[in-house]
Image (spheres, helix red, strand yellow):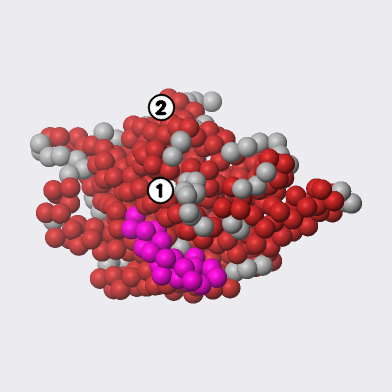
Amino acid sequence: MHGFEELKPSQDDSPGSGPWYKELSRYHWFVLIVAALGWLFDCLDQQLFILARPAAMKELVQATEGMDAKALDLARSNAGNYATSIFIAGWATGGLIFGMLGDRIGRAKTMLLTILIYSAFTGLSAISTTWIDFSVYRFLTGLGVGGEFAVGVALVAEVMPNRARSYALSLLQALSAFGNISAAFINLGLGIAEEEGLVSSPWRLMFMIGALPALLALFIRRRLKEPEQWVKVRNEQAAQSKKMGSYRELFADPLWRKHAILGLLLGCSGVIGLWSVGFFAPDLIRTVQKKAVTAAVLEEQKVQAGSDEALLKLISDVGVAMGDPAAAAALAPPALEVKAKVDGAVNGRLSRWASYTSIAINVGAFLGMFGFGALSQRIGRKPTFVIALLSAFVSTVAVFWFLEHFWQIWVMVPVMGFCQLSLFAGYAIYFPELFPTRLRTTSTSFCYNVGRFVAALGPIVKGQLEAVFVDTPEPLRYAGVTMCLVFLIGLCVLPFLPETHGKPLPE
């Protein structure tokens, strides 16, 4: 069998007939698999952070003197919001830097760098001692995460035959759901282990696992070649003494500037909606179920205690102290041992529920992301965006207003995941089609990642809204519903963007 390096990664512009995948060579499949794995592991890291965030904040943010239970919960929520915002800001910064590098030094080399960066700093997140150094590691992780998307989609877009491009890009994005689901299963397994008392601080183990994708970089370095289209344009630009990946050129041209600014606003709509609302659904289920799960665990402990009056008294004391940090601090050592056991069981069970919620989101996401590609090939990119944005708004409002019971995780949450994450397949397909080769990763990163500087404010705004609704039983529920208005921003910019369906990539 010949090596991949001998295969030609050229595009075929002929219309063709039959299934789109019949047009793909071995090298096409190789590029798609490598890009998909890079983005899959990228999403694994993102989801590990989302699922580990509540437990990490619980360990890294401790009560101070005079702080009651509600104030402590708010402090931990705020720390989680700031950590999320800092991570997103790192993502945006990485998008700026590595998007430009993707045009200047090549797609393959840049992908290698981004995977190494996000793997290394994901692993270092496991050694955090405060939420501040945790946030620093997340910012540095975000640098790699932000750069990987643009180079991956540009690589696939430039290598694939034109007719297969949207299907391949939507499949690339859809496969990222497996990274998210893998993170959910990791969290589920460690949650069960914590519930059984087998591990402590499982969130640290999660981040250590997240360092493993660095091994993919070795595979990429040996086999992946730069797209012929990029090599050709680079040589032409060098002959004319012009720079690849120039932000000055992007904003000097009126057409590319318009596409960049409007694309950024379109990207913000989905990014803020997902990271400031959708990805807090696992936190929501933990919040609304915490009281019921705690009561259930205490009852189970009482059943196990049987007729042991002394142990039953300790369990009752722990039950009273569960909602009062001052009372918890005053517990005697035997009661503290019981409390530690109850805490582990409660945290593990809530982690399971959060894992189920994440799995449900991503089952829907896989179908929604591939569905966007198929529908956009039939009715066009812009009409598909309209449907996706409206559906994301309605489904997310429904989840944050009504989600409470276990069965709803498997009915409502997949629909939300289908609608919200379908937008990201749209970004993977649409953004590369708006810009020429010499600016493709620069501009795609600008639209998809620079909007994260704005999106980084989303969790902080959500935190402020939670403070406004602090006197309600579930502040996160009301804050989430209010934040859903962000999905409507995308509808306002679509009329001013072009339809790219059926057109070749700009040169």
Kind of residue at badge 1:
Ala
Vertical position of residue 9 compared to residue 389: above or below: above
Residue placed at 53% from the left, 43% from the top?
59
Q: Which mark is residue 18?
A: none
Kind of residue at badge 2:
Arg
Which residue is the site of mark 2? 221
Vertical position of residue 474 compared to residue 323: above or below: below
Check disc 2 and report its element: helix, strand or loop: helix
Kindly tell me whether residue 277 is visible in this rendering. yes
Which comes sooner in the sequence, label 2 or label 1? 1
Foreground of the two, 102 or 339: 339
Which residue is the site of mark 1? 83
Mark 2 residue crowding within 10 angstroms, few (<14) / some (14–19) / many (20+)? few
Foreground of the two, 286 or 67: 67
Residue placed at 26% from the left, 41% from the top?
97
Q: Position of residue 362 (x, y in %)?
A: 56, 55
- Give the residues in magenta: 455-479
Residue placed at 49% from the left, 28% from the top?
215
Q: Is residue 239 left or right of residue 27?
A: left
Whether the magenta-drawn stretch holds residue 372 is answered as: no
